[in-house]
Each structure stands twice: as structure tokens, then as C-alpha cells.
Amino acid sequence: QVTLVESGGGLVQAGGSLRLSCAASGRTVSSLAMGWFRQAPGKEREFVAAVTWSGSSTYYANSMKGRFTISRDNAKNTVYLQMNSLKPEDTAVYYCAVKGGGGGYYYMSAYNYWGQGTQVTVSS
């Protein structure tokens, strides 16, 4: 069993930055890929970014490329999401997840552990 706790969300003005953290406990996740998803009010949860177990490869949704950076520190069992040049449309609850199953990095069904989420609000 893995427990994920996200932190770092908050209110920021458009153009600003936030760094989200996701700490895993219960078992080590250093051998597993991890990802970030987000869900805006009234919308479906969508893929944001993912990182392989070693951190050597990363994947991003098109709208986040160049603005968001995912990274991980396996010694701390933690994954990060650096978000720059934030826009009001980035407002959502951001969730981290562990990819324990098959399937592509972009699909929710490939992730079997989820955090409770952290709210990010970007004001215009």
C-alpha cells in the first residue's frame, strides 16, 4: 500500500510560479513511474506530466510543455512539479499518482495509487 500526500498548492497570480510536492509513504516508489494529473471544476481529470522511475525520461501534456517540469528525488520518495508562467486555465486540483500498471503514461488507468490532491488557483 502506498500513501501519497501532495503539498505546495495555493493562490497565485497569472504569470507566477508554484512548486508542488508529492511525498510517498508505505513503500518505496523508487522503482515505479509517477505522474501528475489535474481536474478543473466541471471537467474530467487530465494528464499533466509523468516521470520514469529513474527520472531519465519525462512526459508532458502539450499545453504544459515548456512551462511545467516534473522531477523526482528517490532518496526522499518524493516527486515534484515545478509550474511556471501559470495561467488562469491552470486552476485545478492537482493529483499525484503512482504508475503500477501497464498502459501508457498518459492514461489514468495505468496508475493505481492516488493522492488526495492539492488546489491550485491562478488569478487573472
Image (tube, rainbow, N blue to C red):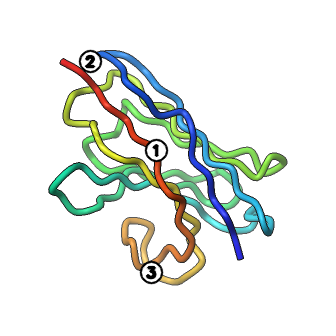
Q: Position of residue 34 (x, y in %)?
A: 58, 60
The kind of residue on which mark 1 rests is Thr
Please, what secondary structure does the residue beneath circle 2 have?
A: loop
Drawn side of residue 42 relative to residue 10, left or right: left
Three-letter code, disc 2: Ala
Residue that appears at 20% across and 36% down: 89
- Between residue 67 and residue 29, name the one nearer to us: 29
Residue matched to label 3? 103
C-alpha gap between disc 3 and disc 1: 25 Å
CA separation in Å, label 2 and label 1: 18 Å
- The residue shown at (42%, 35%) is 68
Mark 1 sits on what residue?
118
Residue 15 drawn at (x, y percent): 30, 16
Q: Any mark on residue 14, and which?
A: 2
Q: In this image, 55 relative to 103: left or right?
A: right
From the image, state whether disc 2 or disc 1 is nearer to you.
1
Q: Nearer the viewer, residue 71 or 9?
A: 9
Which amino acid, mark 3?
Answer: Gly
Judged from the image, the secondary structure of the residue bearing numbered disc 1 is strand
From what the image shows, is residue 40 above or below residue 2?
A: above
Which circle, 2 or 3, is nearer the viewer? 2
